[in-house]
Amino acid sequence: MAIVGSGPSAFYAAEELLTRRDVDVDVSMFERLPVAGGLVRFGVAPDHQTTKAVERVFSRTARRNGFRAFLGVEIGRDISVDELLDHHHAVIYASGASDDRKLGIPGEDLPGSFAAREFVAWYNGHPDSAGRTFDLSGRRAVVIGNGNVALDVARILACDPDRLVPGDIAEHALDALRRSTIEEVVVLGRRGPEHAAFTTPELIALGALQEVEVSVHGGYDASDDAPIKLRTLADYARRSPRPGRRKITLRFHEAPVEILGDSHVQGIRIASTRMDGSEQDLEASMVLRSVGYRGAPVPGLPFDSQRGTVPNVAGRVVDPVDERPVPGVYVAGWIKRGPTGVIGTNRYCAAETVDALVADHQHALLPQPSRPGDELAEVVHSRCPDSFGFDGWKRIDRYERVEGRRRGRARQKLVEVGAMLAVARGTENDQYLPQ
Ligand SMILES: Cc1cc2nc3c(=O)[nH]c(=O)nc-3n(C[C@H](O)[C@H](O)[C@H](O)COP(=O)(O)OP(=O)(O)OC[C@H]3O[C@@H](n4cnc5c(N)ncnc54)[C@H](O)[C@@H]3O)c2cc1C
């Protein structure tokens, strides 16, 4: 079997396949980056280290007999979808969501307006964001959206950067946040608090930041028997102002109408989503659109551009025209069901996919590979000479942890691909490595 991706759904699918008693399989995992983990490394906030501990579960899977990995190999670019299936009985695509939903309002593409995904990738040291900069020299940033990602970016922007040191935030982001002059982060939700998608622990984490004043614009009250999330908001609304601190202001029932500015974001026009629809302009130097990640197509694989997912029934990829299953091709995780759910959700999602795959195997519905699996390793090494296996990733992992420990941090992330390759190959004295 081949699995594309190395995020939670890929590893949960591998674990399920390698531990089932009713099948005896080998699993080859293909990841386009030189590092494994998907959004556990590049999405989960750098100050949420307990969440990132799930990487240990993934490493255990990687040590199982029958597992091998190819890091630095992009399916659909280096190896085609058809080629991959030619060498395997089945392929599970667990390629996640690497794109963003759009707002569809004027000014969305102005410099200073970003998808939250880009900002998250930057502070988490994604190699695609290496060398990027975010200008944090303004006074106000506006985050559009009301999910946990919106609260993550608001917290990272507003908190004392020293809080982030023990985690694994990328060094360049820590430096930029130390120089930041942002005084207020506004979080904008088009619906009311009772519909906000963020979870209670994320909301409570905001209020726990002593150095930040969290408030609810226009006030808010909740009855004693209201859900804890609403009572927490009411508590924030009652707090007396604490001048001199950075602010996070939660605004509800307001939708963005236009991002304002000539050559750079200067503000945002918002409209009340209540009856009167009144509009207001807010000055801002940065807008982060946190309205959802979105799957990206893999060339050669069916794709539903409306939903941003691969069309499937319980994990079996189906032809978008006749809706019949494409033999041997499956999906798991965010590319299967869209960008919802926590890490653990992907376990059930991957198990459902593997159930479908095993049932198809038992009914002799899987195609016979037309070429030997081992031959693909030679093709990979000739086309992607910089690719390496899981041992290379473990070397990077160890290096980052040791370097982190020296600095009192969970991990000192490598960001440049060149530096990652140097460590994976065991040439740590390489010029690419940060000193
Ligand atoms: C900002 C953010 C914060 C989050 N915080 C939390 C949290 O605190 N707790 C929690 O439980 N959940 C959190 N989540 C949710 C969690 O990260 C997701 O549920 C989970 O990562 C989805 O897993 P996945 O395997 O489907 O996709 P991903 O994790 O995105 O993995 C997909 C992998 O596929 C690779 N890939 C893509 N295309 C190809 C290709 N063509 N060839 C080879 N490889 C490819 C990608 O590089 C990536 O490594 C967060 C999500 C985000 C966005």
Image (tube, rainbow, N blue to C red):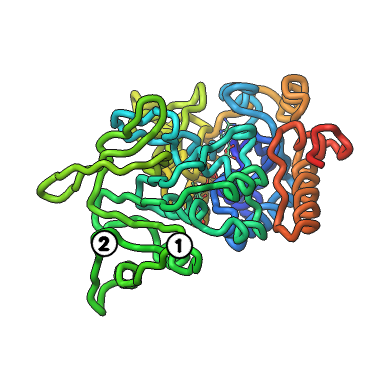
Q: Residue 20 vs residue 423: left or right? A: left
Q: Please, what secondary structure does the residue beneath circle 2 have? A: helix
**Residue type at tag 2:** Glu
Q: Residue 433 vs residue 81: left or right? A: right
Q: Nearer the viewer, residue 194 or 298?
A: 194
Figure quadrant of residue 379: top right
Q: Which residue is mark 2?
A: 194
Is residue 365 visible to the viewer in this orientation of the structure? Answer: yes
Q: Residue at x 48, y 26 (%)?
A: 301
- Residue 55 at x, y = what percent? 65, 54
- Residue 230 at x, y = what percent? 30, 68
Residue lying farthest to the front in this orientation: 244
- Ligand 1 lies under 8 Å from the Cβ of mark 2: no
For residue 252, above or below residue 329: below
Q: Residue 97 vs residue 410: left or right? A: left
Q: Residue at x 38, y 41 (%)?
A: 284
Q: Nearer the viewer, residue 51 or 414?
A: 414
Q: Residue at x 42, y 50 (%)?
A: 150
For residue 38, above or below residue 129: below
- Residue 309 at x, y = what percent? 41, 35
Is residue 424 visible to the viewer in this orientation of the structure? Answer: no
User: Mark 1 and mark 2: span between their CA atoms?
Assistant: 30 Å
Label 1 Cα crowd, 10 Å radius (few <14 / some 14-19 / many 20+): few
- As drawn, the label of residue 244 is 1
Q: Of the residues under marks 1 and 2, which one precedes in the sequence?
A: 2
